Image: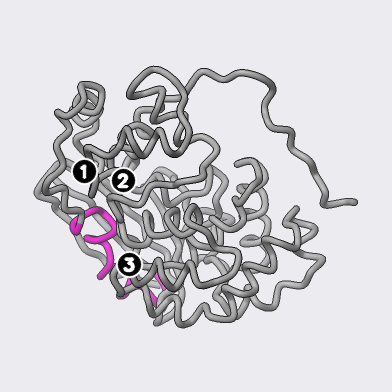
Amino acid sequence: MDPIRTRYEPHRELSLRLTLGPLALGSTDPTVQRDAAGLWLTMATPAGAASLCLTPRAGGVDAAAWGPGSEHAIAGVPALLGAEDDDTGFDPSRHPVVAELHHRAPGLRLTRAGRILPFLIPAVLAQKVTGIEAKRAWRELVRRHGEPAPGPAPLGMRVAPSAAVWGTVPSWEWHRAGVGPQRSDTVMRIAAVGASLERAAGDGVPEVLRKLRGIPGIGIWTAHETVQRSHGDPDAVSIGDFHVSKRVGWALIGERVDDDGMMELLEPWRGHRQRVVRLIEAAGIGYERHGPRMAIVDNRHR
């Protein structure tokens, strides 16, 4: 199978790791992997499945795609690599920490993946559970129900299931993956309108958020986690996240804050509030933790 190739040469510095990092649900995500050839992503396109390999070279990125959806994958490379990321009006100098983080990460761009379901469903799986549980559920479900990646993708890579396939996952498969009825029911509701949601990938963020929030089980956190990736929204902060507000508070004022405190701290960057969060996350800034970690309960064999 011969690939379709292109070369993307950005006008500004670009880091694949920083820009595309949010697309992977952990290092074991079967839809995003890295090997000696470069960074690999799989995707379902209107024309069919595709595998995309991105290899950084001097002055740009070489892209190669395999599968029925390869043309679609190649056409989306510029947006995927931040070509549509507009930071007009973003002033990092409003806070010395933000200014320093911006200086340290000149290659960070906000990706626009142009797809909704591959980011909406992992967000649902991550609702009110630990990251370890969410990553495990996504990995097991995609490996069992996704199709093999086209072309010479790394062994074990899969294309995330379509809405129609998600709608056929039986109850015992959800249980086996550690996903309770509340989250699996939400995925089933998404599957029922999945085709219309994928068509909405070209809509503006306000309309997409309206459609997402209209599905029972999808709140502001899940909707914002999705449009951060599908649309590269620079302002959609993950309100309700267990960690984000604490990280933002620790980075900007040296103490943990709640969501209200976070939004107050981010207000000077309205329009680019998620951009500030990404800079903080990309720098690996954590926060001082007190008390035991959240317990992980494995209900798969109960």
Residue at far left of view:
11
Q: Which residue is mark 3?
A: 206
Q: Which residues are magenta?
A: 66-84
| Percent x, y of residue 137 | 67, 53
The amino acid type of the residue labelled 1 equals Leu
How crowded is the residue under tag 3: few (<14 C-alpha within 10 Å), some, or many (20+)?
Answer: few
| Percent x, y of residue 281 | 39, 34
- Mark 1 and mark 3 in contact? Answer it, CB < 8 Å: no
Mark 2 secondary-structure assignment:
helix
Mark 1 secondary-structure assignment:
loop
Q: Which mark is residue 14?
A: 1
Task: Tell me which numbered mark, 1 or 3, is placed earlier along the sequence.
Answer: 1
Residue 80 part of the magenta-drawn span? yes
The answer to whether residue 98 is above or below residue 36 is above
Residue at 51%, 65% in the rendered image: 149
Residue at 36%, 56% in the rendered image: 53
Task: Tell me which numbered mark, 3 or 2, is placed earlier along the sequence.
Answer: 2
- The picture quadrant where one finds residue 116 is bottom left
Q: Which residue is mark 2?
A: 19
The amino acid type of the residue labelled 2 equals Thr
What colour scheme has been applied to the protein in the rendered image? one colour
Give the side of residue 49 with respect to residue 181, left or right. left
- Mark 1 and mark 2 in contact? Answer it, CB < 8 Å: yes
Q: CA distance from mark 1 to mark 2?
A: 8 Å
Q: CA distance from mark 3 to mark 2?
A: 23 Å
Give the side of residue 187 with respect to residue 9, left or right. right
Residue at far right of view:
302
Residue 274 part of the magenta-drawn span? no
